[in-house]
Image: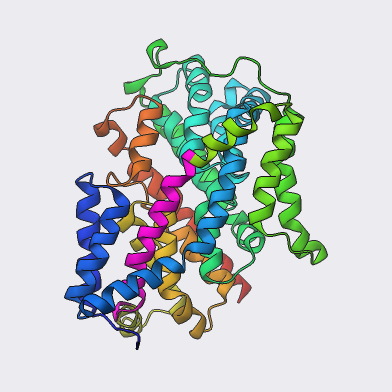
Amino acid sequence: MNEVTFSTIGALIGLAISIILIIKNFHATYSLIIGALIGGLIGGGGLVGTVSTMVKGSETMMSSVLRIMTSGILAGCLVKTGAAEKIADTIIKKLGEKKAIAAIAVSTMIICAVGVFIDISVITCAPIALAVGKKSNLSKSSVLLAMIGGGKAGNVISPNPNTIATAEAFKLNLTSLMYVNIIPAICALIITIILAMYISKKKSDIVTSQDLESLGKNNLPGFFASIIGPLTVIILLALRPIAKINVDPLIALPVGGFVCLIATKETKNTKEYVSYGFSKIIGVCALLIGTGTIAGIIKNSALQTDMINLITALNLPAFVLAPVAGILMGAATASTTAGSTIASQTFAKSLIDANVTALNAGAMIHSGATVVDSLPHGSFFHATGGSVKMGISDRLKIIPYEAAVGLTTTIVSVIVYLVSH
């Protein structure tokens, strides 16, 4: 059967329907599938052509889904052994309460960068961050922004679902994509600290005793035992650029998890911790499958051609397509993973054909997807607000600051591309 081409209006209507359903709290995966189906039909693909394209779109996600599934082992082990909490606690103690904002941001960045998903990174750091915030007389808004901004900085240099999906779409080595955004990540961290310190002066929502909860595990492992698992992953992934030995994330991520279990002497709980990790990642995997359906429709529509024509008409350089696509799709899906995946799947070929290197194109899309990915129709908005017992109205006020952090990452990523060319 010949490949079907859908109209731009059909693809956009399908995406809009998905967004509306997600905002109405309909299941995100089903929302994306329904949007893809309706968009494909309106776009002129017919029922058979639409379904075929949706299936093919989901099939392109399978390698990413497999790698993300195995990443759940590392995340589960880091969280359940107390290793993630120990890393965060150590960093905060080392930097001290006088540098509380920086300590909170750095700890969340590192937890996310070593392979814990960003929402879990914030939830893991929240009890410690709130305790430090109370001692330092900080506002909940500043504490939450420090964690979210630090998490965003860590997310663009991590072996997390969003990075894996982008690397897959551009056929990139995961380590290379992680490395190329190190400078943007550091700049994002600096902006996070500056903005969080600025809003910490607004004493309208000071952390109180009622906000504090138990830190969970009583006997945390030592720092070396906590960090050795993530270090193992970093070393294994670094073997390719250093020694030309290719260890796939499918292997490196679970190996790091098992090393963490051995180092923390928690091997007896392997079954429980692995199951916990799987429970945390299965939603992301399902979301990616749904994302694949709408990505298939968008990828086979005239949307990418129309966007390229618009950029050309405005006399903008071709590389602008990368960050713009990341920003738009991140906002549309309220998800870094879904946004970067759709943008990468849709525009990878066009960007490469325009002589934008795959590595820089992937980095700019990836960074762009972090700008407005925390809108209320996504789970991250609610999970992070809940971690510090913050109401929706107060949580909404933090979005502009989060966007500023993501925009910093994106701008610096674009500058890195321009400097290297």
* In the foreground, 371 or 95: 371
In the image, which residues are magenta? 279-303
Q: Is residue 287 magenta?
A: yes
Task: Tell me the residue at 57%/36% (across/down).
Answer: 76
Which quadrant holds residue 38? Answer: bottom left
Check the image and name the residue furthest to the right: 243
Task: Tell me the residue at 61%/29% (across/down).
Answer: 88
Q: Is residue 11 visible?
A: yes
Q: Is residue 69 above or below residue 315?
A: above
Q: Position of residue 140 (x, y in %)?
A: 39, 25
Q: Position of residue 91 (x, y in %)?
A: 65, 29
Q: Is residue 54 above or below residue 126?
A: below
Q: Is residue 323 magenta?
A: no
Q: Is residue 370 visible?
A: no
The N terminus appears in which quarter of the rendering?
Answer: bottom left
Main structural element of the magenta stretch: helix, strand or loop? helix
Q: Position of residue 182 (x, y in %)?
A: 62, 55
